[in-house]
Image: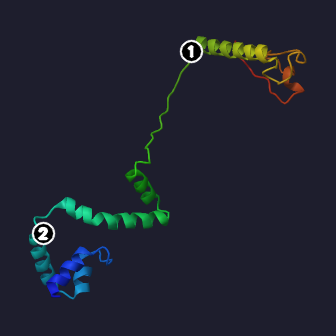
Amino acid sequence: MGKYEEFVEAYKKQDELGLKTNKELYTYLGLTPVTYNNYKTKYLKTVGDYDSQTWLDEKTRHVDAQLIKACEKGSPQALQTFYKLNQRLIDRKEETVKVEFTISDRQKLTADIINGLREDSRITGVCAICGLSQALCDDSLLLAEPEHASDRAVEAVEVPA
């Protein structure tokens, strides 16, 4: 096999040989930079015009292998890239929503909460505050009275009127 044929084989298998740069390849083959460039130009003319997609396709295996190695080493950037490439990563943006209530809104919400608690107590028969049976709880849902919770581990809830 001649030097040019040897160059063609090595050029095609550059990734498999672990040769990443032109310098590594021409050094591996024992060529001068000028001879290497002449061979490369001749080879590219025989395979047709330069096609970036073909070049990228040839490099994909090498890039994938390097990405997997980086993932195995625990690189956060590599893991993120891997998951993005496999469409398994969703970028989520956090939004802060500021909600302001008027006094009447607060009063309505408070009344809704109290009514909901009372309804739950009526249906279940259990005080929503202390968890005792309605029959045992004298002050059921009197949320502003601290004595309701004094002997239980439930704190009084202050509800503005």
For label 1, the SS is loop
**Residue 119's mark?**
none
- For the residue marked with disc 1, what is the amino acid? Thr
Image side of residue 121 versus residue 37, left or right:
right
Image side of residue 115 versus residue 12, left or right:
right
Where does the N terminus fall, quadrant-wise? bottom left
Quick one: label 1, few (<14), some, or many (20+) residues within 10 Å?
few
Residue 121 location (% of width, % of height): 78, 16
Q: Residue at 40% across / 48% down in the picture?
A: 87
- For the residue marked with disc 2, what is the amino acid? Val
Q: Residue at 33% across / 68% down in the picture?
A: 62
**Alpha-carbon span between mark 2 and mark 1:** 75 Å
Q: Examine the image and state in which quarter residue 20 appears.
A: bottom left
The residue nearer to you, when weighing 1 against 119, is: 1
Residue 41 location (% of width, % of height): 11, 74
Residue marked by disc 1:
102
Where does the C terminus fall, quadrant-wise? top right
Residue 53 location (% of width, % of height): 21, 59
Is residue 160 shown to the viewer in this render?
no
Residue marked by disc 2:
47
Depicted 123 relative to depicted 31: above or below: above
